[in-house]
Image: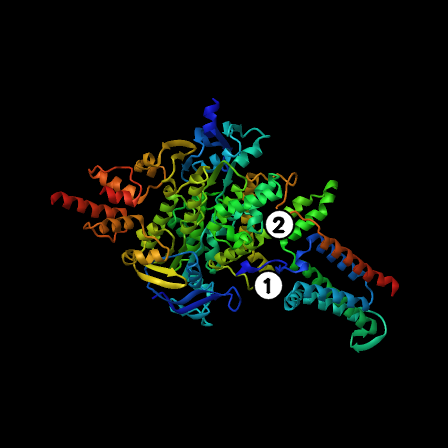
């Protein structure tokens, strides 16, 4: 049931994209996002689309799944589109009463909406091709140089791993508590915002208490297994760059540098 | 002295544990002046009702909590010794009651790796240990599975594998079957027996289920933090009235013999199984 | 008839690779005043079945009629169904949330829209039924209590709704022998005192044997056996095939009888076994 929900769904596979070191993928996505904000015209978008299409093809990702991923954010995309459409000043094209659509507005709204779509799609490419553990390992390794200046990279990664591990468990717990309270006549559905918030108390209080209890027991179990922070820890799967990783990273850096440069050349 | 120490795995010396009561702040004793020696390779069971102090005792054995008075020695190492505490915990591993709240990783083999990783074991060696541990608990087929999809019994076996991967001499089980269904309980008990018989691990099993104590080498009954009975299962279980007054159970067949003997018969009073009773009658 | 299920199916995740038929053409009738034991392996459909009985889950096929009300009919109000069929989940103490025990037990009656006096009466009665002292505990936080006490508070919370049917899912889970005996005694007391139908879901054959007068055995989503306690427990082979056991004492009597001894083997408790064996021994002595 609720057990099958995974945050940022991971689609296991054996493509080159899947096999890339997670750090490479994280850096590429960072470059991707940066490039999106440097691009000011539509032409480089062709390259962006080519990139996304290329990854989807190589990794054999299900396109309808990616499109489904846009659904929850449809609202924001539409708002962005609408705001830019009606609020941009310029050469008037159409007048609908108080609302004015300009040529610049039309261009801007499409441009911004597309940027959002690419942003969401690009990030989901990362989570679709990288398992949650690989992601947290990658983030931990990338952040670990900063632990010298006080950033608790290992602890953050451990927190992320544990959170990911417990999401399905806590969802199950939520389901159980909801059902137990509903069996006592609790109503989680009707009423205005205020009363619905109040009605959440019989759900949230037990959930929090249980979560704290779990945390306490888990901490004890971790101590019993000699956990004492990141110092001296080895890893079962040490991340190591191979030639392919270097090659892809270099290639993609050049690719996105080119895209970013279009802002200044075009 | 050394010879004696070689044979003693856990040495509990006049241990007490104090805490202040939630309700009125008075000082209470969870464990009162307890002394006990557990031999290497022994299958030792601690029986007691909820609140008898058995969990507190369990946590003192691997140093998760320190006694207020007295000392606990694991393989000669004192749990008060901060330098030795990690050696103690890798020598005496512990499996807890709630299968979910012991599993840290999102994939079975990653969780089994957790202990060795903490000990700084090199990756190639971790790999070997994981494979061996999963083999022992018969969960090799599940090594790439997500733990939350496993049954309670399977989760506990993964937890046991996680401890085995640290290569302990002794494993403490704190009510490991209390939250499991009958088949899960069976899986775990069979694994525990295997660990004791085939792998020679010293086992300390904390439980309130008497049928889990039936095959132990020795059983200790704890009540209000004190050891009130200590002996072989047969010696302990024939004292039906005493056990009942301590809030514990005996196997139904043992109780039947006890009832028959009350009527004047004189059957062997240490019968623990159906087969034994059938033979006797 | 207070509960009737006709050809009830339930399919999890229909149309996906995770599709599973949890309930398969279930037909059941429960009369008022019965004390029923529901047994079955984990995954046999027990929990799913039980959640259908108070409308928390809706069947994918078939009809469920509770006290004359068809659950699928538009006129049926779920709240009244949930009042009529009280469901106590496993580890019910995990649902406690209020500041005081009084308030937590009052949650159910309040949701039913009862007057303050009626709510007060319900809380007092419920606490008495589960053996909790009203004056001593009403203002205390439920989180201060021991596990067994917390469980009683949770059960009282359901009883306070005065259901006609009380379903308890593994009420003794995680309790030690004394705690188990206490709760089962209380359940028995409630059954004897109130005019109530009880369905007890349990893995413990000994507990079931001691309390219930009828047993449903679930296996792979179907009702595999349905009959009086003695009758069901006499079917050892079928039960074993389903991975279920029988009380140790019953097992012993069967084994003993199997050796050719003249004893009744449909024994459910130690007292009954004692009677049988004593008779047997005396007759042997006389012979």
Asked if labels 1 and 2 share a chain, the reply is yes
Most extreme residue toward the right is: A265
Q: Which residue lies furthest to the front in this view?
A: A243
Q: Which residue lies furthest to the top in this view?
A: B1
Q: How far apart are marks 1 and 2 (CA)?
A: 37 Å
Residue A182's x, y, as percent? 49, 59
Q: Is mark 1 on a helix, strand or loop?
A: loop
Asked where in the image residue B189 lies, by quadrant, the reply is top left
- Where is residue B234? Give x, y as percent: 32, 36
Q: Residue A192: which numbered mark, if any?
A: 1
Q: Earlier in the sequence, mark 1 or mark 2?
A: 2
For disc 1, the chain is: A
The reply to whether residue B64 is visible in this rendering is no
Count of marks placed on residues = 2
Task: Tell whether label 2 touches label 1 (CB within 8 Å).
Answer: no
Residue holding disc 2: A161
Foreground: disc 1 or disc 2 = 2
Q: Does residue A9 appear to the left or right of B15 in the view shown?
A: right
Q: Give the class, few, some or many, for how many residues have Cα within 10 Å of label 1's Cα (few <14, many ≥20).
A: few
The foreground one among B195 and C241 is B195
Dot 2 falls on a residue whose secondary structure is helix
Query: What percent of the width, then of the height, locates residue B149?
Result: 52, 55
Q: Mark 2 lies on which chain?
A: A
Image point (58%, 48%), residue name: B110
């Amino acid at each position: 049931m609720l057990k099958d929900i995974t945050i940022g769904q991971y689609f296991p596979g054996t493509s080159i994209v899947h096999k890339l070191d997670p750090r490479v993928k994280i850096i590429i996505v960072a470059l991707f996002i940066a490039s999106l904000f440097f691009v000011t015209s539509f032409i480089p978008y062709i390259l962006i689309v080519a990139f996304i299409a290329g990854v989807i093809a190589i990794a054999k990702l299900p396109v309808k799944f990616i499109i489904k991923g846009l659904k929850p954010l449809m609202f924001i995309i539409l708002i962005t589109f609408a705001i830019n459409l009606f609020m941009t000043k310029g050469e008037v094209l159409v007048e609908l009463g108080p609302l004015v659509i300009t040529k610049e507005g039309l261009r801007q709204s499409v441009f911004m909406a597309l940027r959002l779509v690419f942003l969401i799609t690009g990030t989901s490419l990362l989570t679709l091709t990288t398992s949650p553990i690989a992601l947290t390992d990658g983030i931990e390794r990338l952040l670990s140089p900063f632990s010298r200046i006080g950033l608790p990279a290992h602890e953050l990664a451990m927190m992320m791993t544990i959170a990911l591990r417990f999401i399905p468990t806590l969802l199950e717990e939520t389901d159980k508590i909801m059902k137990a309270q509903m069996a006592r006549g609790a109503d989680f559905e009707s009423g205005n915002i205020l009363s619905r918030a109040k009605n959440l108390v019989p759900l949230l209080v037990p959930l929090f208490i249980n979560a704290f209890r779990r945390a306490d027991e888990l901490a004890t179990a971790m101590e019993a297994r000699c956990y004492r922070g990141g110092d001296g820890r080895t890893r079962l799967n040490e991340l190591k760059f191979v030639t392919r990783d270097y090659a892809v990273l270099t290639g993609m850096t050049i690719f996105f540098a080119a895209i970013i440069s279009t802002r200044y050349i075009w | 002295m050394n010879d004696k120490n070689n044979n003693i795995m856990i040495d509990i010396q006049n241990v007490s544990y104090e805490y202040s009561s939630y309700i009125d702040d008075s000082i209470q004793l969870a464990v009162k002046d307890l002394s006990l020696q557990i031999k290497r390779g022994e299958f030792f069971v601690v029986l007691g009702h909820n609140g008898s102090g058995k969990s507190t005792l369990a946590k003192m054995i691997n140093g998760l909590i320190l006694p207020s008075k007295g000392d606990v020695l694991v393989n000669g190492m004192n749990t008060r010794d901060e330098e030795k505490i990690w050696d103690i915990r890798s020598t005496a591993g512990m499996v807890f009651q709630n299968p979910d709240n012991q599993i840290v990783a999102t994939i079975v083999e990653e969780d089994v790796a957790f202990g060795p990783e903490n000990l700084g074991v090199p990756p190639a060696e971790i790999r070997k240990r994981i494979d061996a541990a999963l083999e022992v608990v018969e969960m090799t087929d599940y090594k790439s599975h997500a733990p939350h999809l496993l049954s309670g019994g399977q989760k506990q076996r993964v937890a046991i594998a996680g401890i085995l991967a640290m290569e302990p001499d002794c494993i403490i089980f704190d009510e490991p079957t209390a939250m499991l269904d009958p088949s899960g309980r069976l899986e775990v008990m069979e694994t525990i027996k295997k660990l004791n018989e085939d792998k020679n691990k010293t086992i300390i099993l904390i439980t309130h289920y008497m049928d889990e104590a039936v095959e132990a080498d020795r059983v200790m009954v704890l009540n209000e933090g004190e050891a009130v009975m200590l002996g072989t299962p047969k010696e302990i279980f024939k004292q039906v009235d005493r056990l009942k007054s301590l809030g514990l159970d005996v196997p139904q067949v043992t109780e039947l013999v006890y009832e028959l003997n009350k009527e004047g018969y004189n059957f062997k009073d240490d019968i623990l199984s159906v087969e034994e009773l059938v033979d006797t009658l | 008839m207070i509960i009737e299920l006709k050809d009830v199916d339930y399919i999890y995740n229909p149309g996906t690779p995770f599709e599973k038929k949890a309930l398969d053409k279930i037909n059941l009738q429960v009369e008022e005043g019965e004390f029923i034991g529901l047994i079955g392996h984990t995954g046999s459909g027990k929990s799913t079945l039980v959640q259908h009985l108070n409308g928390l889950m809706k069947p994918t096929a078939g009809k469920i009629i509770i006290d004359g009300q068809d659950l699928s009919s538009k006129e049926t109000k779920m709240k009244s169904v949930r009042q009529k069929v009280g469901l106590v989940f496993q580890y019910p103490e995990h649902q406690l949330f209020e500041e005081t025990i009084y308030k937590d037990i009052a949650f159910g009656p309040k949701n039913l829209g009862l007057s303050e006096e009626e709510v007060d009466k319900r809380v007092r009665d419920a606490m008495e039924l589960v053996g909790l002292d009203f004056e001593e505990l009403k203002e205390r936080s439920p989180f201060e209590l021991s596990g067994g006490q917390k469980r009683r508070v949770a059960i009282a919370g359901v009883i306070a709704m005065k259901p006609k049917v009380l379903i308890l899912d593994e009420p003794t889970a995680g309790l030690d022998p004394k705690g188990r005996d206490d709760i089962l005694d209380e359940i028995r007391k409630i059954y004897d005192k109130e005019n109530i139908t009880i369905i007890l879901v349990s893995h413990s054959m000994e507990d079931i044997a001691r309390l219930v007068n009828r047993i449903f055995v679930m296996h792979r989503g179907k009702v595999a056996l349905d009959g009086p306690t003695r009758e069901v427990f006499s079917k050892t082979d079928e039960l074993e095939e389903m991975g279920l056991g029988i009380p140790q004492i019953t097992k012993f009597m069967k084994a003993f009888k199997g050796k050719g001894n003249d004893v009744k083997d449909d024994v459910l408790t130690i007292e009954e076994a004692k009677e049988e064996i004593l008779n047997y021994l005396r007759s042997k002595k006389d012979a």
